[in-house]
Amino acid sequence: MSATFRIAGAGRLKQAKIAGFSFDGRPYTGIEGDTLASALLANGVHLVGRSFKYHRPRGFLSAGAEEPNALVEIKRDAARKTPNVRATVQELYDGLTAQSQNRWPSLAFDIGAVSSIASPMLSAGFYYKTFMWPKAAWKNLYEPKIRAAAGLGVAPEQPDPDHYSARFAHCEVLVLGGGAAGIAAALAAAETGVRVILADEQAEFGGSLRFESGAKIEGQDGFSWAQSALAKLSAMDNVRVLPRTTAFGYYAQNFVGLVERVSDHLQSPGRDLPRERLWQVRAKRVVLATGAIERHMVFADNDRPGVMLASAARTYLNHYGVAVGRNIGVYTANDSAYAAAIDLKKAGINVAAIVDLRDNPTGPAIDEARGLGIEVNFGRAVIRAGGKLRVSSMTVQPKNGGGERTIPVDAILMSAGWTPSVHLFSQSRGKVAFNDETKRFVPGIYAQDCVSVGACNGTDGLSATIDEAYAAGAKDAGSKPAKGTKPKVDASESWSRGMLGAAPGAGAETTVKAFVDFQNDVTAKDIRQAVHEGMRSIEHVKRFTTNGMATDQGKTSNMHGLAIAAETLGKPIPQVGLTTFRAPYTPVTFGSIVGHARGPLFDPTRKTAIHPWAERQGAMFEDVGQWKRAWYFPKPGEDIHAAVDRECVTVRKTAGLFDASTLGKIEVVGPDAAKFMELLYTNPWEKLEPGRCRYGIMLREDGFIYDDGVVGRLAPDRFHVTTTTGGAPRVMNHMEDYLQTEFPHLNVWLTSITEQWAVIAVQGPKSRDIIAPLVEGIEMSDEALPHMSVREGRICGVPTRLFRMSFSGERGFEVNVPADYGEAVWEALWAEGQKHGACAYGTESMHVLRAEKGYIIVGQDTDGTVTPNDAGLDWAVGKKKADFVGIRGMERPDLVAKGRKQLVGLKTRDAKVVLEEGAQIVADPKQAIPMKMIGHVTSSYWSQNCGRSIALGLVAGGRDCIGKTLYVPMPNGVIEVEVTGMVFFDEKGERLNG
């Protein structure tokens, strides 16, 4: 079809190329630079969708991101299908394929529209009152049907073949919004020399200057000035300009998430281009220049295709060169709609009438409209829109009642005023304030270093906007003043304030469908019903009616809904409150958030420096968190049991080498390092001498064990902290959280060094003989290097932090070397170990060896409800310490009460029976079911060194049960167990020194 509504000489796309596209299988042509919306309108297409609940015909309401109706599916191929794309934002390219949603069998004839007939039964909150009888119908009838009907669009079934990228950026000034205010602020900030990022969601900067024909700046029309200013900014080395980039979330400490649409507008994106790019920006200062959003008029059948915002029609005309109709009616309570009528009239489009709800408005726009011969009706209301698949008329009546008049039209432009876009300000945790004079919420109390400028701040007029924005951009931006001059406004447009709530003809006495929220089919009547049914908070009204809960988040509906609720309650608007604006500002694809983290990269696979050696030796691996760890090293003919038995015996008989590189490692450095450690761990640290180590326990505030590990003091101001493998990230976060929020006065730095050091544990009676020949500068005798010591020196010619410690109960060492040398040092130690009959052992043997000695593993032998006393670790709690994280939690009555579960050893009566981990423990196996469980098995193994099975378990009053018999009910019978101490091998600990 040809673009019959494209106006010759209008718009800015005159020299653009023709682009072919299809909508619902029908071919059309547009111009490169069009959006899908402008291209469809150029072809006279207004019907583009169906509403969610009633399946009413819907057309374009807006020309931007606030669009609630025109949601379509964009399809490049079977795998590249994207539902719920706003046609007002999607840029046209040659070959674009779009399809309408939420209809069957076709857009023009939708069976779902029968729900509109049943609308009296589907009013607000109907889902809270229906589908309750008969009870059995919910599972078999109601729920399947509701789930099938839920949602908008169809999710793609094939994996997404596109890729997405992510960038981190820092700047002194981040300007969000590329209209006159944002550009002026960016110019002022950039001229001080600081780093500036300017982002806007549109493909072209300019904001409302795209449609304002009356704006002139620096001798140019407003939009031309914006492009000149943008070119200047783009040429500056300290400025990054990001078009097609939406700021979707404003988080703590001036951290802003933005998503850039990189290739959605291209016909054939290169394989090297991501589809979208996620920007994570940390700014010293944020300038919010997000503008304002025009409100619609709330009247009967205001959702007909062809009924749209006045600013939208003006954008389609002045930017895209498209007329939204040939005989247009205007309904307004605001001067800005007059500008739309004037522009359309000058372009040769007939304006049937302007209906103004105000009684006697005056001003240049009104005079000009009359001068052009446009009929202007004051004090009147449009009480109804005619038509079905396209608006055909508007019925006008004096606002206080009287005779009706029907005016034929093919489009209705409406404007109830403008709502400042405070979404990002609200996300920053700022508090909005209600301006009673202008009847709008504007930024009030700021929570972060940001400033709102222009329309989003409630500032009226172009001159005032640029003055405010330029001053905000220059303020505190840099050490030197701005070198440029503030842009001069030569001419601008002035708009009055408008109205809130339902218009006459849609009042409380009516039952008409006057839509407040278009996407969720929420009417003025629904808002009133919510109040009548007891909803008093606007948040409750929102959830009862779903007003503002659609994909547009109520950008056009929130203020109308609030005003109607306030009127019904008989309260001022501020007393009713304002709903919470949450991220994302507009929908964000999963792809942009996930980025490369999918498939094999969904969870990064981490491998140690020694991993290649273990692979060559035929090791079997297990996943521990993100790490691949050698599980066991089978020899030919060995299964896991035979391999583990051999490894465990060899370690205790001669020696074994174990890759412990995955242990978390954190360096705590600074003059207050010891004070910090005193506060984060239960143990005392101030008196620990440099060169010595100590086993440390970390608690949560509630007094439960959070992590553990050996800590070495390298110097008075430096600690080498080890954590569990899986706990490393959370411990680092835990430390940073307390350092930054609770103990910011401490002069301490925390550095994760997990991947900087490879760790080789050499355990067993021959361990010192294996290490000693390779070590330089460290005395290896028991007197010079006793158990729980650490020394710095060299091994195999490379730096080492050598710990004398053991997780097996044998004489042991942990050799820390820079990760780049990990495999080479391992091979040297392995060569020495072969001289003594040593073996390599994996995590399974490590677990058996530590269990033989009763050493716990946090997360296996603890479950988040275990205290140091429960685990038998009272000795690791400093008795004279006045404070540490968790000290008060430990003292709670429940945590010191008798009968708590305590960690104990368990031996089966039949030594060959190995308990299952997680199995429940009871005192009387003959009791009635359900039995009273008094504990469970936490660790269980066959121990070749002990010649029997061994286990650890949490048992109520466990230490008082030592020597008693308890029972473990299993499907194949009851297993008798004896409660014992936790140490099964070398109870006196004599083997620590060989």
Image (spheres, rainbow, N blue to C red):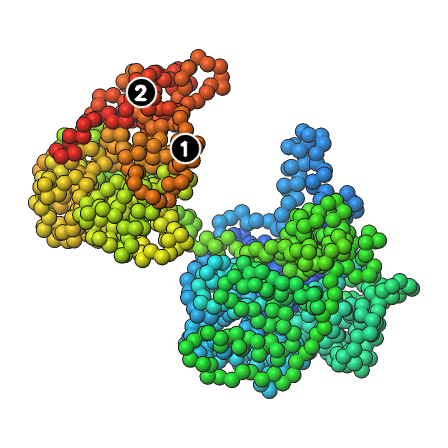
Secondary structure category for the residue under label 1? helix
Seen in the picture, residue 750 relative to 949 is either above or below; the reply is below
The residue positioned farthest toward the right in the image shown: 403
Report the mark closest to the observer, 2 or 1.
1
Residue at 49% of width from left, 14% of height from top? 928
The residue positioned farthest toward the top in the image shown: 926
Percent from the top left, x then y, of residue 419? 66, 65
Q: Residues within 10 Å of mark 2 (few under 14, many from 20)?
A: some
Task: Pick whichever, 474 or 277, lies toward us.
Answer: 474
**Cα gap from disc 2 to disc 1, whole angstroms:** 21 Å
Task: Pick whichever, 285 or 61, lies toward us.
Answer: 285
Q: Residues within 10 Å of mark 1 (few under 14, many from 20)?
A: some
Mark closest to the chain's N terminus, 2 or 1: 1
Can I make out residue 69 in this image?
no
Q: What residue type is labelled 2?
A: Ile
Task: Pick whichever, 210 or 100, lies toward us.
Answer: 210
Q: Residue 962 carries which label?
A: 2
Q: Mark 1 points at which residue?
A: 895
Can I make out residue 965 in this image?
yes
